[in-house]
Amino acid sequence: MLDKIVCSRCNQVHINTGSGKCPQCDAGHPYMYEFQNSEEVLKERVPQVIRERRELGLEGLVGDLEAVIINTQPEFHKPAAEEFLRYTGLDFYQGFEDEDYKTCVLRVENSADFLLRSGNKENNPFTEYNIAPKSAHLPDTRLETFVFECRDIEKYFDIQKNRGVRFLSGDIIKTDKYSFIQTLPSKFTGNSVGMIQWHGEPGDYFTSQSQPLNWELQKPAHPYLKNIKGLDHSATRIHAQDRDAAILEFMGLTNYNFDFAIYVKMFNSITNVARLSGARYAMVFTSGISPYINDHDSGPTEKFIHNYNVRVHHIAFHTENIEETYDCIKKDGMDFLIDLVGSPDEGLKQTFTVSSPYTLLVNEYIHRYGDFDGFFTRSNVTLLTGSTDKQ
């Protein structure tokens, strides 16, 4: 693999040509350095972020994941909803529209909600993160926002604004059902982090400004769909050079903490997990160990980013009776990147579907056996990462 040079002034990555100069801003020493991810800087910075959260009064304000917001092209909105109903445990809960979006809420017990929406809103702030060789045909499509429960949104907003965090709206959006705020898309992940504080019944998104969306969406009556439970985790693929910054940024916006990383050197990939004690949902970030050079040498993680831009790669659903469920989903027409990997002896089984033509998301089905106290195994992560090279 060719050496890569990173400029710490402009963050430009380029192949080491021996010139010692950045082609973007012409900076030289001391700004230029050879780049490869390690734990050294991250482990030094994590305690600093936790300490800062406590000193600012952020600790304890943010809870578990309440919802994910997935935007689709208008013509694929209903097919995307029907696909989720067909291949997951999610069921249709409510549909509504307002001046900006049509939204359908998909729900399964003990899980974050899925807010699947489409609209014709101009100046979409996410569009720049959706454009890449294999995603440009869906310029408004991505899992855009992770919405977390917030116990005091006014306090949270004031603290984060004073930290320099920028939000999509100038102030908190207040409705009769909830108050809501979300950040601008991150330059590292392309994702937004949202906060919601409920005033009425938690989970009721239909406000006084909403009009009913008269869709009749029927869930197939397949018994095996009841085996597919809530959202376990999602994984965002990010550039190697942005790995530390993305994790630390997310920690600063939530109460989640960096937990561990699994390095898969043969595929130039790192799977990084952030968790919140007692929460049902975990956030995963996957990056290269070293930056992209070309599709052949850089491995499937950096290759995916080159082809699809930074974005959520997959969403994982906890699945009971995973062998039977996998067989049934396959018979119902779903294609997979890999067969089931893992075993009861190893503690878990997992698999990846192909990506959806409507959302570009891969579904992961995952089952942890018995008293398995880990989150992933290195062997499973290696096999799953390798399978994504087919994308």
Image: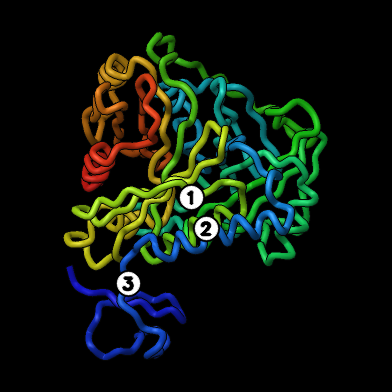
Amino acid at pointer 2: Val
Mark drawn on residue 258: 1
Q: Residue at x 19, y 72 (%)?
A: 2
Label 1 and label 3: CA atoms lie apart by 21 Å
Q: Sequence-wise, which precedes: disc 1 or disc 3?
A: 3
The answer to whether mark 1 and mark 2 are in CB contact below 8 A is yes
User: Could you tell whether 226 is left or right of 93 in the image?
Assistant: left
Q: Sequence-wise, which precedes: disc 1 or disc 2?
A: 2
Q: Name the residue under label 2.
A: 46
Any part of residue 365 in sight: yes
Q: Residue at x 27, y 18 (%)?
A: 323
Quick one: label 1, few (<14), some, or many (20+) residues within 10 Å?
many
Q: Name the residue under label 3.
A: 35
Q: Is residue 96 above or below residue 93?
A: below
- Give the image location of residue 109, x and y in percent: 56, 20
Of residues 119 and 372, the one drawn nearer to the viewer in this rendering = 372
- Give the image location of residue 151, x and y in percent: 74, 40
Quick one: label 2, few (<14), some, or many (20+) residues within 10 Å?
some
SS for dot 2: helix
Q: In this view, does 341 lie above or below 247?
A: above
The mark tally for this picture is 3
- Give the image location of residue 144, x and y in percent: 53, 48
Amino acid at pointer 3: Phe
Label 2 and label 3: CA atoms lie apart by 20 Å
Of residues 267 and 228, the one drawn nearer to the viewer in this rendering = 267
Q: Sequence-wise, which precedes: disc 2 or disc 3?
A: 3
Quick one: label 3, few (<14), some, or many (20+) residues within 10 Å?
some
